[in-house]
Image (cartoon, rainbow, N blue to C red):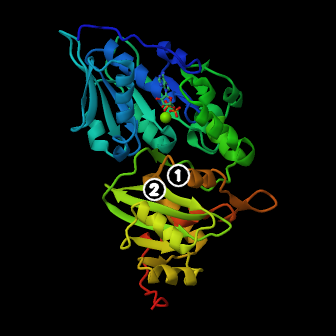
């Protein structure tokens, strides 16, 4: 392809100065749907065209997340912008997207996971790095990544971080935000060699009215979630139990599957699917609905593809309902209910867990789920219960399935 320049159409005012920005660090954060990932992908593509012979690393914490997220996303930006003829994608080896102009060496974006240090070591001439969902990486990961950029370039070295902010206890907050909290409310402020850009869905002309409505509906009913996802603010609520999990768009098939079930009549009854594929746990909230009797509930399960033989861990305080499901032929087991132990198990698996983006009930519970605090604001070793039906279902599934228990549970027989 002889075209040596990429015509970038800039359509998002919050992040658009990113294209011309040559700072060593670009921190792009903000609300969900603000267009961060799209702009970061466009910038990377622009640099591939401008810098023959160079490698740009596109990183996530887990390499297993690449295929379902940033790699597909970058290719869809290419297609959407009509650049297909300029780039080639490789789905295996290390995944990569390659550009080569006539008579020039090829330049490539290489998609890697930080959990694969061997692959990382093998990539040379790195001039740029994009870390997607950067709140998932540790400070140590970040420092290691910086060491990958070396060599000589006539142009510039740059690291781009994109993420939705979390609690203010996060190392990213401490590093770039704690000294200048006013940045939170300023678009595109530049400081020393770091530029910080913030946007929200309001800045993205491509989000539709439905998305806007969903966001605005949270304003009063779910203020913490609204602050994080709609306004894209760092949270002072350090007492939240869960940092945001990774997200995925498509629930995989195959692998090992099991389910967690929390019964409810006035409260929603929650059924959560956990699917372990290649070392990652893909979670999806399948049912979240009050007033379901077992017969209706089992019909729904069948419609959703849950099999009678699939293992379901259910709230063990409702033996009657479990026995009833058993009679209907379902493979239901009483769950281990110790809340703190269960939360600890969930936290242990946090890094390897991804939540399907449509699991709204689960995500919204998690965005509000806080530790109990005493009157001085000190965390006590327990979580506030109440709005935690999907979380409980998830906890039953993970904790019961993944912790060994020699005792046989015999009371069903
Ligand atoms: N410049 C653009 N052109 C077309 N679609 C866009 C553009 N910017 C964002 N979008 C669309 O808006 C949605 C949200 O953008 P995304 O980059 O995923 O947001 P974020 O990463 O901030 O959550 C996506 O569906 C994306 O394709
Ligand atoms: Mg994104």
* Residue that sits furthest to the left in the current view: 103
Q: Quadrant of the image for the C terminus?
A: bottom left
Label 2 close to label 1 by CB (< 8 Å): yes
Residue 257: x, y in percent?
A: 37, 64
Asked whether the viewer can see residue 396, the reply is no
Q: Residue at label 2?
A: 283
Residue at the image position 46 percent from the left and 59 percent from the top: 349
| Quadrant housing residue 388 | bottom right
Compare marks 2 and 1 and give the one earlier in the sequence.
Answer: 2
- For the residue pair 140 and 202, the one nearer the viewer reads as 202
Q: Residues within 10 Å of mark 2 (few under 14, many from 20)?
A: many
> Given this view, does label 2 or label 1 mark the residue nearer the observer?
1
Residue 82: x, y in percent?
A: 35, 18
Residue 379 to residue 227: above or below: below
Residue 346 to residue 202: above or below: below
Q: Which numbered dot is residue 359?
A: 1
Residue at the image position 56 percent from the left and 36 percent from the top: 32
Relative to 12, is 251 on the left or the right? left
Whether the residue under disc 2 has CB within 8 Å of ligand 2:
no
């Amino acid at each position: 392809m002889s075209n040596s320049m990429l015509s970038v159409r800039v359509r998002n005012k919050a992040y658009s100065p990113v294209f011309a920005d040559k700072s060593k660090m670009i921190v792009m954060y903000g609300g969900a749907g603000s267009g961060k990932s799209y702009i970061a992908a466009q910038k990377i593509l622009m640099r591939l065209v401008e810098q023959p012979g160079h490698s740009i690393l596109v990183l996530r914490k887990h390499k297993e997340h690449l295929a379902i997220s940033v790699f597909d996303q970058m290719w869809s930006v290419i297609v959407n912008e009509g650049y297909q003829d300029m780039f080639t994608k490789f789905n295996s080896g290390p995944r990569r997207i390659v550009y080569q102009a006539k008579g020039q060496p090829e330049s490539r974006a290489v998609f890697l996971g930080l959990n694969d240090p061997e692959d990382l070591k093998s990539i040379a001439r790195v001039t740029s790095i994009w870390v997607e969902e950067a709140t998932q990486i540790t400070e140590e990961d970040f420092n290691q990544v910086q060491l990958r950029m070396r060599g000589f370039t006539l142009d510039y070295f740059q690291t781009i971080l994109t993420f939705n902010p979390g609690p203010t206890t996060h190392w990213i907050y401490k590093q770039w935000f704690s000294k200048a909290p006013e940045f939170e409310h300023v678009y595109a402020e530049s400081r020393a060699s770091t530029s910080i850009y913030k946007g929200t869905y309001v800045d993205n002309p491509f989000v539709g009215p439905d998305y806007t409505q969903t966001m605005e509906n949270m304003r009063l009913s779910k203020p913490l979630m609204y602050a994080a996802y709609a306004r894209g603010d760092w949270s002072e609520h350090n007492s939240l139990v869960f940092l945001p999990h990774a997200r995925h768009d498509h629930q995989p098939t195959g692998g090992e599957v099991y389910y967690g079930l929390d019964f409810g009549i006035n409260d929603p009854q929650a059924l959560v699917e956990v699917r372990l594929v290649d070392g990652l746990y893909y979670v999806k909230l399948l049912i979240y609905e009050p007033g379901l009797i077992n017969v209706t509930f089992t019909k729904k399960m069948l419609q959703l593809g849950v099999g009678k033989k699939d293992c379901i861990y259910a709230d063990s305080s409702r033996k009657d309902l479990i026995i009833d499901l058993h009679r209907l032929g379902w493979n239901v087991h009483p769950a281990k209910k110790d809340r703190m132990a269960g939360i600890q198990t969930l936290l242990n698996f946090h890094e390897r867990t991804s939540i399907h983006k449509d699991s709204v009930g689960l995500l919204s519970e998690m965005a509000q789920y806080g530790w109990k605090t005493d009157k001085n604001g000190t965390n006590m070793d327990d979580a506030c219960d109440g709005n935690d039906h999907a979380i409980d279902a998830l906890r039953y599934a993970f904790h019961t399935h993944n912790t060994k228990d020699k005792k046989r549970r015999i009371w069903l027989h």
